[in-house]
Amino acid sequence: MSNSMTLNVRVTGPLSEFVSQNVGKDGAYENVSEYVRDLIRRDRERVEAASFERLKAELTTAFAAPEF
């Protein structure tokens, strides 16, 4: 079963203009919801990549340590 969440976000001024440029006939997204979902997915990927890099660094350090 999938959970769903409804978000209401108000943006004004430059943020509103920026969103408008990315949504609609001339933008990369059909609607604001699609745009926000893509932003959330990209943020999730960023967080997962950062976590992976930390793990990789820890493993590199552990494997480089001398064995006794």
Image: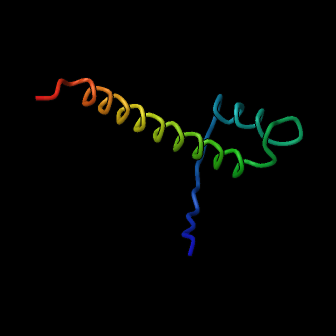
User: Foreground residue, 37 or 58?
Assistant: 58
Which quarter of the figure is the N terminus placed in? Answer: bottom right
Indicate the position of residue 6 as horizontal and vertical percent values: 58, 62
Display coloring: rainbow
In this rendering, the answer to whether 57 lies above or below 45 is above
Residue name at image x 65 percent, y 45 percent: 38
User: Foreground residue, 38 or 24?
Assistant: 38
**Farthest-out residue, front:** 68
Q: Quadrant of residue 21?
A: top right
**Farthest-out residue, right:** 25
Indicate the position of residue 48 as horizontal and vertical percent values: 47, 41
Indicate the position of residue 23 as horizontal and vertical percent values: 78, 41
Residue name at image x 57 percent, y 71 percent: 2
Residue name at image x 10 percent, y 29 percent: 68
Residue name at image x 81 percent, y 47 percent: 30
User: Foreground residue, 67 or 13?
Assistant: 67
Q: Is residue 27 left or right of residue 38?
A: right
Q: Is residue 66 left or right of residue 4?
A: left
Q: Is residue 59 left or right of residue 65?
A: right
In this rendering, the answer to whether 8 lies above or below 24 is below
Indicate the position of residue 50 as horizontal and vertical percent values: 43, 34
User: Foreground residue, 51 or 26?
Assistant: 51
In this rendering, the answer to whether 65 lies above or below 43 is above
